[in-house]
Image (spheres, grey):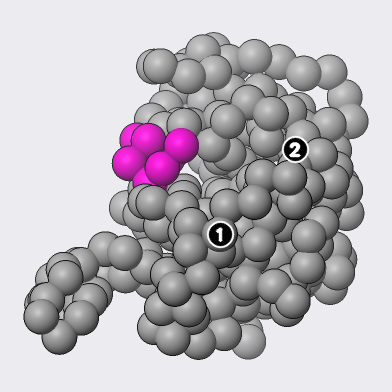
Amino acid sequence: MRVLVVTAVPVERNAVTRAFGGAEEHVALPGAELHRRGAFDVLAGGAGPAAAAAATAFALASGASASGASASAPYGLVVSAGIGGAFTPVTPLGSLVVADGIVAADLGAETADGFLPVTALGFGRDRFTPPPALVRAVAAATGAAAGPVLTVSTVTGSAERAGALLAAHPGALAEAMEGFGVAEAAARADVPVLEVRAVSNAVGPRDRDAWRIGDALAALTDAFGKAAPVLQGWNSHEDLEG
């Protein structure tokens, strides 16, 4: 099965591709470039949900074969991956998170009574649920914690905002900026989606001296090395069967 992995920036893409053996091939897409190793195509799609959705949609539409579009070998899975902030101490720095829910945490409207998600306004959706059996298998293979990962357009920078997010989304483990955009594109192409994050910092006040980006990138490489057989061998029927 072919797997498309979408990161925000090249350093995350490179951390993922380091996990896979074999020669690397580069495939040009409109405005981007895939790095292909075996069954895995890894794309740095840009920061934020809009860029992530656009890049994912282009890759899915093209089929991204070495010679151009390929209807004979479509992707069977899309993975949003990278580093992110976590609601510690549940998910400490350097740990891994696999999303059992990909949640648009700030998509909606501010009102006099507080924030209303887009679903409360009567349209759209604010959550995607990755295949449960796949989430369990990846968590078991990598030692990741499984729980909701929030997609935000503005990274949290205060304890008050971190507390508000947790109050609105109890049990949330991490926040990042691309997962929901990747999931929107995958859903429109009817392809299952997963999100994997390595923790580089705590959600809350921005203390750059406390960030562990190098450790998180190393954890991301290790995670995909362990998860590669699970991702490539996963069959959607596993989730249909429970």
> Label 1: few (<14), some or many (≥20) within 10 Å?
some
Q: Residue at x 12, y 76 (%)?
A: 111
Going by the numbered disc 2, the residue's amino acid type is: Val
- Circle 2 crowding by C-alpha within 10 Å: few under 14, some 14–19, many from 20: many
Say left or right for 81 vs 51.
Answer: right
| 57 or 149, nearer to the observer | 149
User: Residue, x 58% and y 39% (percent of image)?
Assistant: 7
Asked whether, in this view, residue 114 is left or right of residue 188, the answer is left
Figure label count: 2
Q: Identify residue for label 2.
A: 16
For the question of whether residue 29 can be seen, the reply is yes
Q: Nearer the viewer, mark 1 or mark 2?
A: 1
- Left or right, 51 with reference to 233: left
Q: Main secondary structure of the magenta part?
A: helix
Residue range of the region highlighted in magenta in the rendering: 47-54
Q: What amino acid is labelled 1 in the image?
A: Pro
Residue 70 shows in this picture: no
